[in-house]
């Protein structure tokens, strides 16, 4: 499914889109993909997209995140 951002492939596409968007605006956004467990409601495993942004906006703090 092309619009499914919970799969590994979809999460990779979303990661690239977010990084490219902010890079064009002069920000270095760090994004990690984290493999989540199986969810019965989704009937599959998921991949979470996590970043060092705050409320969807790059933060001034350059430290990495966990």
Image (cartoon, grey):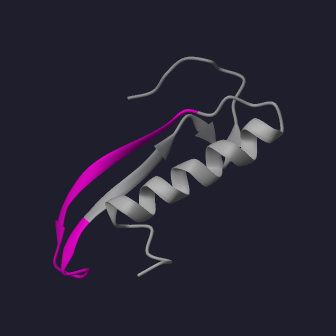
Q: In the displayed structure, does residue 65 sit left or right of residue 53?
A: left
Dominant secondary structure, magenta: strand
Q: Find residue 48 and report its image quarter.
A: bottom left
Q: Looking at the rendering, in which quadrant would you find the N terminus?
A: bottom left
Give the residue at x 26% y 80%: 42
Q: In the displayed structure, does residue 35 sit left or right of residue 32?
A: left
Which residue is nearer to you in this view: 33 or 2? 2
Q: Outermost residue toward the right?
A: 25
Expressed as whole percent of the image width and height from the top left, the position of residue 59 reads 69, 30
Give the residue at x 43% y 58%: 11
Q: Which residues are magenta?
A: 30-45
Q: Looking at the rendering, in which quadrant would you find the C terminus?
A: top left
Expressed as whole percent of the image width and height from the top left, the position of residue 55 reads 65, 48
Q: In the displayed structure, does residue 20 sit left or right of residue 16?
A: right
Which residue is nearer to you in this view: 57 or 6? 6
Vertical order, 56 against 30 (above or below): below
Q: In the displayed structure, does residue 15 sit left or right of residue 22?
A: left
In magenta stretch: residue 6 = no
In magenta stretch: residue 43 = yes
Give the residue at x 62% y 38%: 53
Vertical order, 45 against 66 (above or below): below
Expressed as whole percent of the image width and height from the top left, the position of residue 58 reads 70, 36
């Amino acid at each position: 499914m092309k619009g499914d951002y919970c799969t590994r492939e979809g999460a990779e596409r979303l990661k690239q889109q977010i990084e490219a968007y902010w890079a064009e605006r002069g920000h270095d956004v760090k994004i990690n993909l984290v493999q989540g467990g199986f969810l019965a409601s989704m009937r599959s495993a998921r991949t979470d997209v996590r970043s060092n942004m705050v409320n969807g906006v790059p933060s001034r703090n350059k430290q990495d995140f966990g």
